[in-house]
Image: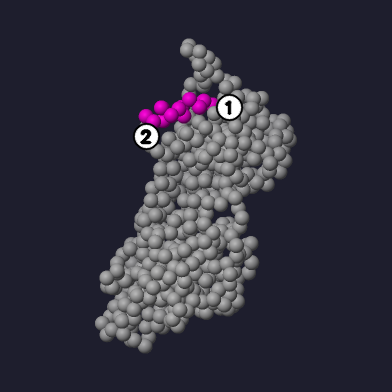
Amino acid sequence: MSTLHDAATTPPTGAAAPEPPQDPQHSDLPRHVVLDGTPLTVEQVVAVARYGASVEIHESALARMAQSRAVIEDLAHDTVPHYGVSTGFGALARRHIPTEMRAQLQVSLVRSHAAGSGPEVETEVVRALQLLRLATLVTGHTGARPVTALTYAAMLDAGITPVVHEYGSLGCSGDLAPLAHVALAAMGEGRVRVVGSGVSTGSTGDRGETVDAAQALAAAGIEPLVLAEKEGLALINGTDGMLGMLCLAIHDLRRLLTTADVAASLSVEALLGSDAPFAEDLVALRPHPGQAASASNMRRLLAGSPLMASHRELDDAGNPACTRVQDAYSLRCAPQVHGAARDTLDHAATVAGRELASAIDNPVVTSDGRVESNGNFHGAPVAYVLDFLAIAAADLASMSERRTDRFLDVARNEGLPAFLAHDPGVDSGHMIAQYTAAGIVSELKRLATPASVDSIPSSAMQEDHVSMGWAGARKLRRSVDGLTRVLAIEVLTATRALDLREEAAAAGTGAVHDAVRAVVPGPGPDRYLAPEIEHVVGLVADGRIEAAAAGAVGHLD
């Protein structure tokens, strides 16, 4: 693997990429990603965006780019108008641009479209959208020069992250403003942050001050891009922002769905519920794959529980049977709800895989050398599943909060003290932790309102139907965070309840209990609860809850 060595494609010299963090929870993610024109995976996107994996462009991809670039350069000198090469954009597409102005056309496009506003989005989102635009460039269907792709790769490896704002994309023609801010930084204009590996998913306050893009590029030894014909359009016309956020959400939700099974198992056990409804033959009567996976997880987590055995009696055949006939839906139907969310996530992953295999630009250079306008930049396919996942996240959190609430009510918690308090009345126990979960669930229900059902016309009615996929992605990120917190509160509450029971827990749930106790003390008089919630949020978010359970019972689906 190498770069092309002629003067037109000399790669920029970038600073060496920082080593990705040694995090055992993410050992399955690659540390180095090679772009050769084949589709990226969700795991590769996460590795580069969140954990600073290095990026390399294969020489075959650079050669392919050079071939398609020759097509664009031929058109750049043609007297016949060609959209994006020798015309204006959007509603101005019928304006024919003189030859001597066509490079300036691209610079003006990027500068004018870098019109975002509002809060700065997270580093990992910017890195994801930059990587995904790069992945489209190396397919050779955009007509961009190899040096343009090499500049983007060098910026990623140097940790140069353009400042991108919350507002500016309607999800069609792609994520225009967010991508324009990235292109602007590659030109040496605008503001950037320079970060190491292991970037934060949360607020922007821990990433240092912003600096001028020209200063950051110079420090990394990267020459600012001087755009050629069509390149400005090629750098901003894609669904990369919404797709990047979808990839990150898929990665996070896979862990959270397994953690939801763990949390539900803790609650069934500590509330003296029954595991009988999770039996394989019963679940198989309704053959949804997600439901089968969740029920299997819960059976394994509850297997051999002395606490579950403590409320079983012998049936007529002499076999131990649970005395609980009908548990509340939030316990009994957990595999059905969690399973539906799993199947929804699988559908979203299928859509993401198709989008990762796409080369999105307008116009595109086809394999036989034609330059054709198209509508592939419309974000509807991605927007729909972003909204669908927000609905699933809200419902999972809603069921989790109901299980938390059952622990606190003496009419429903099977003999536990009110609010799990040390001295009810003097102490309030987890009363307000449930308030917090309830408030988050209410917010998640609002966030579940689809963004993709909205459209607002733009560009003098040329772009008269848009996807709002970027907006759907932004609210899904908040939904994923909210679900993480609601599950953490359930785990915190359920492990406290286990401490208040006399019998031991199952191996799987007991291992989770011990992981929580490693960061949060057991029951006692009231104490400052917010830090304890955050400790368990961390356990859920970074996979330690899932890992603790799997360490005791084997791999969980």
Q: Residues within 10 Å of mark 2 (few under 14, many from 20)?
A: few
Residue 472 in which image quadrant: bottom left
Q: Residue at x 44, y 56 (%)?
A: 41
Front in this rendered view, residue 409 or 196: 196
Q: Which residue is mark 2?
A: 287
Q: Could you tell me the amino acid type at mark 1?
A: Ser
Query: Residue most toward the bottom?
Result: 100
User: Residue 432: in sight, yes or no?
Assistant: no
Q: Which mark is residue 74?
A: none
Magenta extent: 273-285
Q: Position of residue 377 (x, y in %)?
A: 35, 64
In this rendering, position of residue 61 left or right of residue 319: left
Front in this rendered view, residue 139 or 502: 139
Q: Secondary structure at mark 2?
A: loop
Residue 344 in which image quadrant: top left
Q: Residues within 10 Å of mark 1 (few under 14, many from 20)?
A: some
Q: Which residue is mark 1?
A: 305
